[in-house]
Amino acid sequence: MKGCKGLVVSCSYPQSDHALDAPENDAQFYEQLLKSFGFTVRRLSDFKLGLQSSHRGNILRSVEWLIQDAKPGDNLAFVFT
């Protein structure tokens, strides 16, 4: 069976002088879009804590999750907003 996995990372930089407003909305949109096409989605955000936060280590671990067991013909998506 063809695998469909997606990783959506949202970085708004809320503690920065240059904080962004829209990334969280974009991430929610892409998460729902991918799910509507049957993807299993992992979403990271700098508004979440622990393993769901968009810190470097979590992003790297999640990219590993995304590509592990990937086979020719699988569909993988990575969105950074």
Image (tube, rainbow, N blue to C red):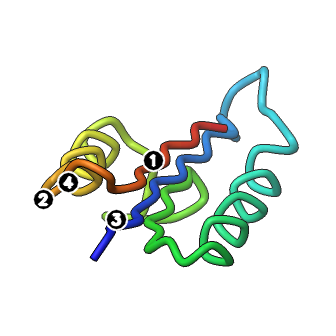
Above/below status of 75 relative to 63: below
**Residue 80 vertical position relative to residue 62 in the rendered view, above or below:** above
In the displayed orientation, state which residue is furthest to the left.
69
Q: Helix, strand or loop at disc 2?
A: loop
Mark 3 surroundings: few (<14), some (14-19) or many (≥20) residues within 10 A: few
The residue under the point 70% across, 72% down is: 32
Q: Which of marks 1 and 4 is nearer the N terminus?
A: 1
Task: Tell us which disc is closer to us: 1 or 2.
Answer: 2
Q: What residue type is labelled 4?
A: Ala
Labelled disc at residue 70? 4
Kind of residue at badge 3: Gly
User: Relative to 9, is 80 above or below?
Assistant: above
Which of disc 3 and disc 2 is earlier in sequence?
Answer: 3
Q: Which mark is residue 69?
A: 2
Which tag, 3 or 4, sits closer to the chain's start? Answer: 3
Marks 2 and 3, Cα distance to the nearest angstrom? 25 Å
